[in-house]
Image (spheres, rainbow, N blue to C red):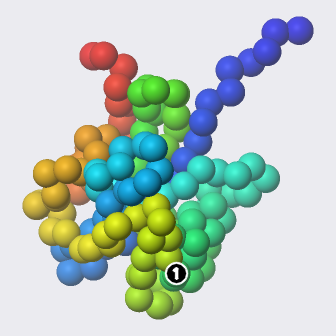
């Protein structure tokens, strides 16, 4: 029997308010340290996309999000060091003020105007935010086109 391809999957939460998006600067993780990303994480398995996003929002930003308040906005099929399916969900509302709950992995959590992202934003994150702003629902990234 042939083994089938097993991709990686991650969820990203887009907290948006007043034209700004919440971004975190990675630190001490060994992956894209010093670069800005979104609250995010791997899907653990045996959980839905929205459940994974709500879990990550609580773990990383200390906020509670009801599953029904998460809306899928962008799907990215990414080919970088590994092949990923990335799911970008917008939090329509949440309880609590986002706070850096993982200072050992994140050294800044700030709001940025969506049209003025930090210069050190991870390129595929920058592209996902562009897709969100333009209403693009699916994008392929890193395939050498």
Which residue is drawn at the image coordinates 41% and 88% (left, top)? Answer: 97
Which residue lies at the image location 41% right of the left edge and 81% below the top edge? 98
Left or right: residue 1 versus residue 121 is right
The answer to whether residue 69 is above or below residue 126 is: below
Is 137 drawn above or below residue 18 in the view shown? above
**Which image quadrant for residue 67?**
bottom right
Q: As drawn, which residue projects farthest toward the top? A: 1
Q: Observer-nearest residue: 124 or 131?
A: 124
Q: Residue furthest left?
A: 116
- Relative placement, left or right, of 48 versus 17 is right
Please identify the quarter of the rendering in which residue 26 is found.
bottom left
Crowd tier of the residue under label 1, counting other residues whose Cα lies within 10 Å: few below 14, some 14–19, many 20 or above: some
In this rendered view, identify the residue nearer to me: 78 or 61: 61
Q: Which residue is mark 1?
A: 62
Which residue is nearer to you in this view: 97 or 85?
A: 97
Q: Is residue 14 visible?
A: no
Locate residue 51 relative to residue 83 in the image: left or right: right
- Tell me residue 74's x, y (percent): 40, 49
Q: Position of residue 78 (x, y in %)?
A: 43, 32
Say which element carries label 1. Answer: loop
In the picture, the quarter occupied by the C terminus is top left
Name the residue rendered at 69%, 57% in the picture: 48
How many marks can you see? 1
Q: Residue furthest bottom?
A: 96
Quadrant for the N terminus in the image: top right
Residue 3 position, x and y percent, is 79, 15
* Residue drawn at (35%, 30%) of the image: 141
Q: Position of residue 23 (x, y in %)?
A: 31, 65
Can residue 77 be seen at all in this image of the molecule?
A: yes
């Amino acid at each position: 029997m042939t083994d089938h391809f097993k991709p990686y999957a991650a969820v990203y939460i887009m907290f948006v308010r007043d034209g700004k998006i919440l971004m975190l600067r990675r630190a001490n993780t060994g992956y894209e340290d010093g670069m800005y990303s979104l609250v995010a994480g791997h899907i653990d398995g045996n959980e839905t996309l929205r459940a994974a996003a709500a879990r990550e929002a609580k773990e990383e930003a200390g906020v509670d999000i009801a599953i029904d308040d998460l809306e899928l906005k962008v799907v990215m099929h990414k080919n970088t060091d590994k092949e990923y399916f990335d799911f970008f969900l917008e939090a329509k509302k949440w309880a609590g003020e986002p706070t850096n709950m993982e200072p050992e992995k994140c050294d800044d959590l700030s709001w940025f105007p969506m049209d003025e992202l930090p210069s050190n934003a991870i390129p595929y994150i920058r592209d996902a935010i562009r897709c969100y702003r333009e209403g693009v629902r699916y994008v392929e990234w890193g395939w050498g086109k």
